[in-house]
Image (spheres, rainbow, N blue to C red):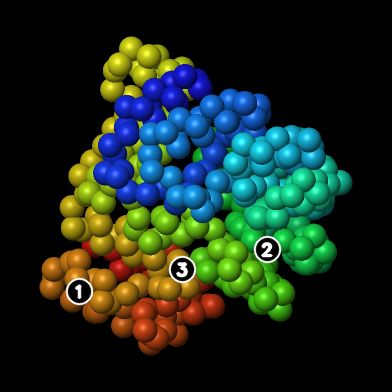
Amino acid sequence: MIECLYLEIEERKHYLNGKKVETIYFGGGTPSLLDSEKIKYLLEKIHSTYQVSQEAEITLELNPDDITEKKITALKDIGINRLSIGIQSFHEKDLKFMNRSHNSTQAKNAINHAYNAGINNITIDLIYGIPGQTMKEWKENLNQLSKLKITHFSAYALTVEPNTKLHHLIKSKKISQVEDSVIESQFKLLQDISEKMNFIQYEISNFCKKNMMSKHNSSYWEDKWYLGIGPSAHSFNGKERRWNIKSNSKYISKVKNNQVYYQSELLNQKQKYNEYILTCLRTKWGVSYDYLNKNFDVNIQNHFKQEIQKWIQQKKIIRNKNYELTKDGMLLADAISSDLFIT
């Protein structure tokens, strides 16, 4: 796999058209299972192939049970300067329900190991809407942010995907699906507590202290070009979306044999508009009408102006400089985006 990633990096050296690389992100699956020498090997290839900023944000995803101070020190020495740690919950019963391999003590220790090794730029993820999770337990999870001096975190509602164990348990009525009213209450508690802790909710699911925003996440919402390497990776160059096949074995076989290992599509105006609405409406910057004027024809502009009015009247959208979701509007972000789409 490593050699195939190396080959794809080389093959796609012109994809970014000379644009400077501001962020590098090792994610998807468990990249922390790689030893630091293999990650170093890939980083050296990236640096020799692309123009990488000296201040580049270089993130690695890790599971708490993978983390030791020795390992973090080795990662720091090869250039990793940000960690994304998959905490999900600090409660044992939640972790067991989600079939996580770590426990609450390992979750807390992982963060402290990172700090002790000298990496202070850390993000963690938390999950709410877990069956059996009480408001008290969710509040306790959020209070850990302050105790552990977290400066960036993501919080997501647990989703029920088709053909999963959770979907089967709900369908067979062995557990009850969490009611929307409970998820809404937990989301509002998330907003209230994070605000009191001086976190900025710069995207519906992403929160940071001042100057600690994720550069990598923000690049997606700012419509910047990006290059994804490896199975399932997605790329965007301003005109085209491209995505690699999911299967590891097929990816390896096709790359080694110089066969096509991806699909792609050129985006038309409607697709570009829909994607802009979907990504930007979720952020604290909202939808820029100036951007719509500069990049889309009058029919698309008129469609947006017409459809946005009812959401403004319902106080789900507020217009400051841009069109932004209100706190109540964030609960309906997907429905509002869908309503604004052009089909």
Of mark 1 and mark 3, the one earlier in the sequence is: 3
Query: Mark 2 or mark 1, which has the lower sequence index?
Result: 2
How many numbered marks appear? 3
The residue to which callout 3 is attached is: 283
Q: Relative to 320, is 192 on the left or the right?
A: right
Specify the amino acid type for callout 2.
Thr
Q: Quadrant of the C terminus?
A: bottom left
Q: Secondary structure at mark 1?
A: helix
Badge 1 crowding class, 10 Å Cα cut-off, few under 14, some 14 to 19, many 20 or more, is: few
* Whether residue 316 is visible: yes
Q: Are marks 2 and 3 in contact (CB under 8 Å)?
A: no
Between marks 2 and 1 in the image, the one whose residue lies nearer the viewer: 2
The residue type indicated by label 3 comes to Thr
Q: Which mark is residue 313?
A: none
* Circle 2 SS class: loop
Which residue occupies 51% across, 22% down? 2
Q: Is residue 107 visible?
A: no
Q: Position of residue 178 (x, y in %)?
A: 66, 57
- Compared with residue 325, is residue 68 higher up or lower down, i.e. above or below? above
Farthest left residue? 298
Q: Rounded to the nearest whole Å, what is the CA distance between mark 1 and mark 3?
A: 19 Å
> Quick check: 179 left or right of 240?
right
Image location (x, y in percent) of residue 285: 43, 73
The residue where tag 1 is placed is 293
Disc 1 marks a residue whose amino acid type is: Asn
Q: Residues within 10 Å of mark 2 (few under 14, many from 20)?
A: many
Q: Mark 2 or mark 3, which is nearer to you?
A: 2
Seen at 23% across and 41% down, the residue is: 265
In the picture, residue 97 is in which quadrant?
top right
Residue under numbered circle 2: 151
Q: Helix, strand or loop at disc 3?
A: loop
Note whether 75 is above or below 149 in the view shown.
above
